[in-house]
Image: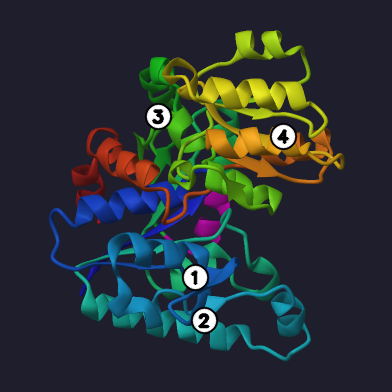
Amino acid sequence: MAKKIFIASTGQNSGKTTTSISLIHLAKQKYGKVGFIKPFGPKPTVFQGRTMDKDAALMAGVFELTDDLDFMSPVVLHGDSTRRVLDGELSADAFLADIRNAVAELEKRCDFLVIEGSGHSGVGSVIGMSNARIAKEVQAPVMIIAGGGIGNTFDSVSLNLALFRQEQVEVKLVLLNKLIPSKRQSSLDYLRRAFGPQPFRVDGGFNYSPVLANPTLLRIAKILDAPLRGDLREATRIAHHVQLGAASAQRVADLLKDSSLVMVNSSRDELMVMLASLYKLPEYRKKIAGLVIPGLAPVQAITQKILDDSHVPYIRTEMTNSEAFLRVTSDVSKITVEDREKIDLIKSLSETEIDFAAIDALL
């Protein structure tokens, strides 16, 4: 029978997927067979001919878990699934049975099993399938992932704890993610005191990392629903800064920071030509991650040729400047199987920032 842990969180974008990658990576150093399951998946995709949740597909791709594909994503929700359950067309009880059976099969196959929840602990409650209910159904101890603050983190964890207590599920650990390095120890100390004699451990997870938080050029292309052009070998390069090319060409050049994504309206030929030329220089290539060229005005033919000849990565969209800027800056970067730099960094950081021995001992 496998050791298992249910990864819950206080909300979206807390670092569940990052934590799952870390735990699988670390568990594989001790256990022979490590598995993953996303019992309740709200983000369908197609992976090797199967419809499954994106996170399950990610783990299968990163860790080559292809033998377990039939069990890694037992319930995948589509846009109309909630209404169909409420209308009686689909059965929540059947969903729960599918989840129980998939977990039972993976427990037979694995020595260690990571079970990743969806969103906060109440997600799915509308059809009787909250994260807390699923954790109870599969009899898994829980780790809650939370942010690295103090007051807000305490409040958010307390709200989520109530639902697990209602379902009589044991919470073993609260893991604080995205900690500010200089405040890591003090944040942990205050929260441990705030929670007092609770029957769970409070520990630190990942420090905040711009590399993990910021998007790759490929991710930006997906956000803008437009192809990445230029040097496609740079597709996984991370844009650490987003800069609006609204000032004069010289001023834009002066303001460039390392690995900047520069947004240049399609009517600004002189700025595109300058950036394309600078991209050829080593000292500027590290500053210019790529360009986003929004606007209805066509790019002039000679400018287009200069862009293409420079091989600067760029994304052309007919969105307005403001719409493209808002889409990029409001997006929270999600890890994909192509993000090898981020995945390798997560694995490396996990070995110093995640106390796997302590987590393993709790189980």
Q: Residues within 10 Å of mark 2 (few under 14, many from 20)?
A: many
Q: Earlier in the sequence, mark 4 or mark 3?
A: 3
Mark 2 lies on residue:
96
* Residue 157 sits above or below residue 126 on the image: above
Quarter of the image for residue 249 reads top right
In this figure, which residue is indicated by the disc labeled 3? 207
Span of residues in magenta: 160-169
Residue sitting farthest toward the right: 296
Instruction: Write down the residue under mark 1.
Output: 134
Determine the CA span between mark 2 and mark 1.
Answer: 7 Å
Q: Earlier in the sequence, mark 3 or mark 2?
A: 2
Pointers 4 and 1 in contact (CB under 8 A)? no
Above or below, 354 relative to 164: above
Q: Amino acid at mark 4?
A: Ile
Marks 2 and 1 close (CB-CB < 8 Å) = yes
Q: Which residue is mark 4?
A: 302
Q: Position of residue 63 (x, y in %)?
A: 29, 62
Q: Which residue occupies the foreground of this view, 297 or 48?
A: 297
Report the side of 271 relative to 70 (left or right): right
Q: Secondary structure at mark 1?
A: helix
Residue 11 visible in rendering? no
Query: As drawn, is 144 to the left or to the right of 119?
Result: left
Q: Quadrant of residue 296?
A: top right
Residue at the spot 55% in from the left edge and 83% down from the top edge: 95
Q: Nearer the viewer, mark 3 or mark 1?
A: 3
User: Left of 157 or right of it: where is 331?
Assistant: right
Gap in angstroms between the C-alphas marked 4 and 3: 46 Å
Q: Nearer the viewer, mark 3 or mark 2?
A: 3
Closer to the eye: label 4 or 3: 4
